[in-house]
Amino acid sequence: MSLKDVTSNLRAPIVTRVADAPTVRVHSVEWRKVMAGEPVEINPSVGHGYRVMSVDEWSARWKKNEAWPECLQCGSKNTKEHHFTQTWCRGKKKWESECLCLECHSFSFRSYCDPDFKTPEEYEKERWQNMVAAEGAKSLEVSS
Ligand SMILES: [Zn+2]
């Protein structure tokens, strides 16, 4: 999946919102601690234990989202993405992204969903319902 796939052929508006804390729960607990100057857990890949971290240090491993670097609050491009998920199903896509602004400490959340996007589960359910409906029609033919 390239960045171009994610950003091109958008057929619905991108939904955006700005918050002063991450919408992603795993990070919101840590964010509160960083803001309060309380120790947060050191990433297991660089060490272990807890340490008081600055915002820069806490977000050091995150990368900028090159497609949408602007902070929705202040317009700064000094942002880092800490959350990105995408789901593709039969050529239809759905994604969400959240970036932290290092200037104003706002979180910019963006999400997108194709108008006719369905999950694999929804496709499966529909297929099954159609099958049941077809079976029902068949048995009606037989009994009449
Ligand atoms: Zn900002």
Image (cartoon, rainbow, N blue to C red):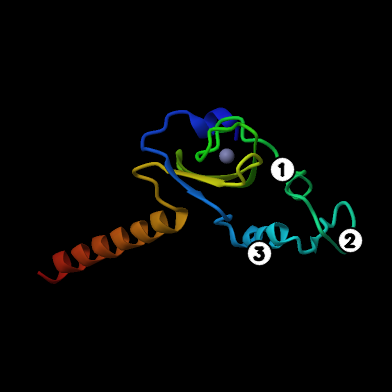
Quadrant containing the N terminus in the rendered view: top right
The picture places residue 39, in percent across and down from the top left corner, at 80, 63
Q: Against 24, is 59 above or below?
A: above
**What distance separates the C-alpha of mark 1 from that of mark 3?**
17 Å
Say which residue appears at 79% left-offset and 47% top-offset: 57
Q: CA distance from mark 2 to mark 1?
A: 19 Å
The 10 Å Cα crowd at callout 3, few under 14, some 14 to 19, many 20 or more, is few
Give the residue pinned by disc 3.
29
* Residue 87 showing in the rendered view: no
Q: Give the residue type at disc 2.
A: His
Relative side of 89 to 44, left or right:
left
| First in sequence: mark 1 vs mark 3 | 3
Q: Earlier in the sequence, mark 3 or mark 2?
A: 3
**Which amino acid, by three-letter code, is at mark 3?**
Val
Establish whether ligand 1 lies closer than 8 Å to the Cβ of label 2.
no
Q: Where residue 48 sits: x, y (%)?
A: 89, 61
- Amino acid type of disc 1? Trp
> Would you place residue 12 above or below residue 128 in this image?
above
| Residue 132 drawn at (x, y percent) | 29, 65
Few, some or many residues within 10 Å of mark 2 (<14, 14–19, 20+): few
> Residue at point 21% right, 63% down?
138
Q: Residue at x 87, y 64 (%)?
A: 49
**Contact flag, marks 1 and 3 (Cβ < 8 Å):** no
Q: Is residue 18 above or below residue 124?
A: above
Helix, strand or loop at disc 2? loop
The kind of secondary structure element at disc 3 is: helix
Q: Which mark is residue 48?
A: 2
Indicate left or right for 55 with 68 as reference.
Answer: right
> Of tags 1 and 3, which is closer to the observer?
3
- Per the rendering, the mark at residue 62 is 1
Q: Secondary structure at mark 1?
A: loop
